[in-house]
Image (cartoon, rainbow, N blue to C red):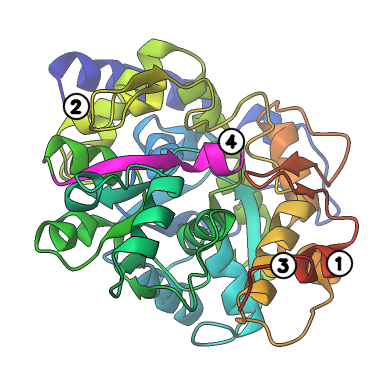
């Protein structure tokens, strides 16, 4: 981190701490009256887990900029090695909160991936910004995109191996959806393995997989290292798709509602700060590249967070739908339809044997009331509806209105 950035962030901490005042609680929080009688966070220090990915940025920056202290809590950040580790530490209480895969939270709540425990999603941390990387060896044979991959798999018959980061997580669902949209059944036509994000590039380097879906900066890192190409971005699969969330257990959420609200408000403000300017994005990139967080060169992060993409084969483009952390509140709101979508895909791929109560489960997990209180504290607008509508890569529209029909309507499924 440069001295300029350190000085800037230090000044920011001092200014914000002074603005908070001796009470340690933001005026915005004090201005809202809650039924409990006090808006002060019940727990003053919280442990928050994260995986080394660019999209941990709003959690990291909330701490670095002192926005946590502004809202009356102190973040203790914990760098984790795998999503399974994050899951286990959330479930057993070693972590209070985590930067976590949307589908992982739902999987734990439904008992699909390891221990079953009631969970809570407090906010969405980011939209977009993941990608699917194919090995340079496949690209040299013409598999540079979905159509090329499908053609190669038809002509060059062998076992193809693809990696995702967690069985019920976002990257697994993007990978499966993308493969299926090109006629490839991920459950029958390929072998799918689970690999932690920071280990993706090393595993591809030694030939353990033909392709992977992961968050940045690991797709761009594969290009920089000359071992992979970007076949598609996840925003091309679903523009403005939900990605990571701020997750906790339902027990923690019920026991410490003011703390949950304060943490959410601080991270909303961090997302606002990141998306506010080009300069802030570049400061964020320099900060999270540090060995304490993502541990990579800043040049692996600072292009794609600005929408400057290359595919590793000479093509470059500017993508308006790059990773966003706030986007006028559209990112951070925990839409019920987003949570429901993951369950439709869990059903599609056989992770869920029966249809759940899609809307009922989403209402249990996504803490919209707490989010709205946090948004008031962070002066963030709230969307008019808890649902939203999108058309995905295969032309199918998802709007949350008939999840059972949607889940059963795919030609390619488990």
Magenta region includes residue 235 = yes
- Residue 391 at what x, y percent from top left? 73, 41
Task: Give how far apart the Cα atoms at labels 2 and 4 are.
Answer: 26 Å
N-terminal label among 2 and 4:
4
Classed neighbour count for the residue bearing mark 3: other residues with Cα under 10 Å, few (<14), some (14–19), many (≥20)? many
**From the viewer's perspective, is the residue at label 3 or at label 1 nearer?**
1
Classed neighbour count for the residue bearing mark 2: other residues with Cα under 10 Å, few (<14), some (14–19), many (≥20)? some
Reading the image, the residue beneath label 3 is: 344
- Residue 94 at what x, y percent from top left? 40, 74
Task: Give how far apart the Cα atoms at labels 3 and 1 are.
Answer: 9 Å
Quarter of the figure with the N terminus: top left
Mark 2 secondary-structure assignment: helix
Q: Which residues are magenta?
A: 227-238
Task: Give how far apart the Cα atoms at labels 2 and 1 are.
Answer: 44 Å
Magenta region includes residue 166 = no
Reading the image, the residue beneath label 1 is: 405
**From the viewer's perspective, is the residue at label 3 or at label 2 nearer?**
3
Classed neighbour count for the residue bearing mark 1: other residues with Cα under 10 Å, few (<14), some (14–19), many (≥20)? few
Left of 26 or right of it: where is 285?
left
Reading the image, the residue beneath label 2 is: 299
Left of 173 or right of it: where is 331?
right
Reading the image, the residue beneath label 4 is: 268
Task: Give how far apart the Cα atoms at labels 3 and 2 are.
Answer: 37 Å
Pointers 4 and 3 in contact (C-beta within 8 Å): no
- The residue sitting at 39% across, 34% down in the picture is 61
- The residue sitting at 51% across, 16% down in the picture is 276
N-terminal label among 4 and 1:
4
Mark 3 secondary-structure assignment: helix
């Amino acid at each position: 981190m440069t001295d300029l950035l350190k000085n800037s962030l230090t000044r920011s901490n001092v200014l914000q701490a002074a603005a908070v005042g001796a009470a340690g609680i933001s005026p915005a929080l004090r201005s809202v009256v809650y039924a409990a009688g006090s808006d002060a966070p019940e727990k003053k220090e919280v442990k928050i887990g994260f995986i080394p990915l660019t999209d941990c940025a709003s959690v990291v920056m909330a701490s670095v900029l002192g926005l946590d202290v502004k809202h009356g809590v102190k973040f203790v950040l914990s760098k984790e090695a795998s999503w399974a580790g994050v899951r286990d530490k959330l479930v057993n209480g070693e972590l209070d909160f985590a930067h976590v895969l949307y589908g992982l939270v739902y999987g734990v709540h439904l008992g699909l991936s390891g221990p079953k425990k009631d969970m809570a999603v407090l906010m969405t941390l980011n939209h977009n910004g993941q990608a699917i990387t194919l090995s340079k060896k496949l690209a040299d044979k013409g598999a540079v995109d979905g159509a090329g991959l499908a053609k190669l798999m038809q002509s060059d018959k062998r076992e193809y191996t693809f990696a995702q980061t967690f069985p019920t997580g976002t990257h697994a669902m993007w990978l499966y959806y993308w493969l299926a949209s090109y006629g490839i059944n991920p459950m029958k036509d390929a072998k799918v393995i689970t690999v932690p994000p920071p280990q993706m590039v090393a595993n591809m380097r030694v030939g353990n997989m033909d392709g992977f879906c992961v968050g940045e900066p690991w797709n761009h890192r594969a290009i920089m290292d000359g071992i992979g190409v970007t076949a598609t971005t996840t925003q091309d699969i679903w523009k403005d798709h939900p990605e990571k969330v701020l997750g906790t257990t339902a027990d923690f959420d019920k026991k410490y509602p003011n703390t949950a609200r304060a943490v959410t408000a601080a991270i909303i403000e961090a997302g606002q700060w990141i998306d506010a300017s080009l300069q802030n994005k570049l400061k964020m990139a320099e900060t999270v590249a540090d060995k304490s967080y993502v541990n990579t060169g800043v040049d692996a992060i600072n292009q794609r967070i600005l929408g400057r993409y290359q595919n590793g084969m000479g093509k470059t483009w500017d993508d308006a739908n790059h990773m966003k952390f706030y986007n006028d509140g559209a990112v951070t709101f925990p839409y019920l339809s987003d949570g429901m979508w993951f369950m439709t895909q869990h059903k599609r791929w056989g992770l869920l044997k029966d249809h759940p109560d899609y809307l009922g489960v989403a209402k249990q997990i996504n803490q919209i009331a707490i989010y709205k209180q946090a948004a008031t504290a962070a002066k963030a607008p709230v969307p008019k509806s808890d649902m939203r509508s999108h058309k995905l890569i295969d032309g199918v529209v998802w709007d949350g209105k008939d999840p059972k029909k949607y889940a059963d309507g795919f030609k390619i499924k488990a």
